[in-house]
Amino acid sequence: MRTSEELTAVAWLTPEEVSEQMSEVFAVRLLDALDGDGPHVRSHDGKHLARAR
């Protein structure tokens, strides 16, 4: 891993750190991939996940 014109920082994060440091719509993608219970289908508006009603 390395930085580039499009990537200014690189870090290894625990799942807890992902939840704390990333916006919800991006964090959920990584956390879903880590749980191994996929595939996952999500709906969001670009900022927040749609909640089941």
Image: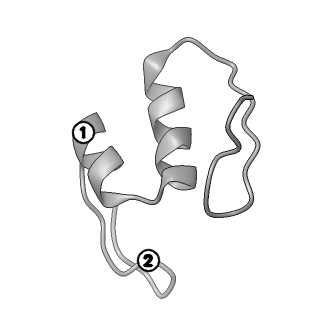
Residue 50 image-quadrant placement: top right
Colouring scheme applied when the structure was drawn: one colour
User: Residue 37 falls in which quadrant of the image?
Assistant: top right
Q: Is residue 14 visible?
A: no
Q: The residue tagged with tag 1: helix, strand or loop?
A: helix
Residue 7 has which mark? 2
Residue annotated with mark 1: 16
Looking at the figure, which quarter contains the C terminus? Answer: top right
Query: For the residue carrying disc 1, how many other residues have a C-alpha within 10 Å: few (<14), some (14-19), or many (20+)?
Result: few
From this view, report whether residue 1 is shown above or below residue 13.
Answer: below
Q: Please tell me which residue lies in front, 38 or 25.
A: 25
Relative to 20, is 26 on the left or the right? Answer: right
Q: Position of residue 39 (x, y in %)?
A: 69, 20
Q: Residues within 10 Å of mark 2 (few under 14, many from 20)?
A: few
- Mark 1 or mark 2, which is nearer the start of the sequence? 2
Q: Inspect the image, locate mark 2, and give the three-letter code of the amino acid beneath it.
A: Leu
